[in-house]
Image (cartoon, helix red, strand yellow):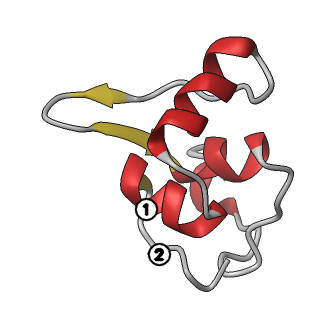
């Protein structure tokens, strides 16, 4: 996961480079339901939430420690 940029959103190209798959393979897996991943923005390029990408591929984000930053009530 050190190959992934430490940002909240990732591009298709970044995901494919990290998993070493082609964009077509990523699209095919998304459409077949093999991975549950939906883009958060479909502008010039599809952007995906980092947490959703890691969850879809069964990874844990060790670069970011679990904190209360995501919970506005804490």
Residue 22 image position (x, y, % from top left): 51, 49
Quadrant position of the N terminus in the picture = bottom right
Residue annotated with mark 1? 14
The answer to whether 19 appears left or right of 39 in the picture is right
Residue 55 position (above or below residue 27): below
- The residue positioned 82% from the left and 64% from the top of the image is 60
Residue 56 image position (x, y, % from top left): 75, 40
Q: Circle 2: is it few (<14), some (14-19), or many (20+) Cα within 10 Å?
A: few
Q: Circle 1: is it few (<14), some (14-19), or many (20+) Cα within 10 Å?
A: some
Residue 29 position (above or below residue 58): above
Labelled disc at residue 47: none
Q: Is residue 18 visible?
A: yes
- The residue positioned 44% from the left and 75% from the top of the image is 5
- The residue positioned 41% from the left and 66% from the top of the image is 7
The answer to whether 44 appears left or right of 56 in the picture is left
Instruction: Give the SS element for disc 1.
Output: helix
- The residue positioned 50% from the left and 66% from the top of the image is 17
Residue 50 image position (x, y, % from top left): 55, 53
- Which mark is first along the chain, 1 or 2? 2
Q: For marks 2 and 1, give the one nearer the viewer.
A: 1
Labelled disc at residue 6: 2
Instruction: Give the SS element for disc 2.
Output: loop
Residue 7 position (above or below residue 54): below
Q: Nearer the viewer, residue 49 or 74?
A: 49
- In the current view of this chain or complex, which residue is farthest to the left? 44
Q: In which quarter of the view is residue 45 placed?
A: top left
Residue 28 image position (x, y, % from top left): 61, 24
Q: Nearer the viewer, residue 58 or 12?
A: 12
Total marks in image: 2
The alpha-carbon separation of the residues under discs 2 and 1 comes to 11 Å
The answer to whether 69 appears left or right of 39 in the picture is right
């Amino acid at each position: 996961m050190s190959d992934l940029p430490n940002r909240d959103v990732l591009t298709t190209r970044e995901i494919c480079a990290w998993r070493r798959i082609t964009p077509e393979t990523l699209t095919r897996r998304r459409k077949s339901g093999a991975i549950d991943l939906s883009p958060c923005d479909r502008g010039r390029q599809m952007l995906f939430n980092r947490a959703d990408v890691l969850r879809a591929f069964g990874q844990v984000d060790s670069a970011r420690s679990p904190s209360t930053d995501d919970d506005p009530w804490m």
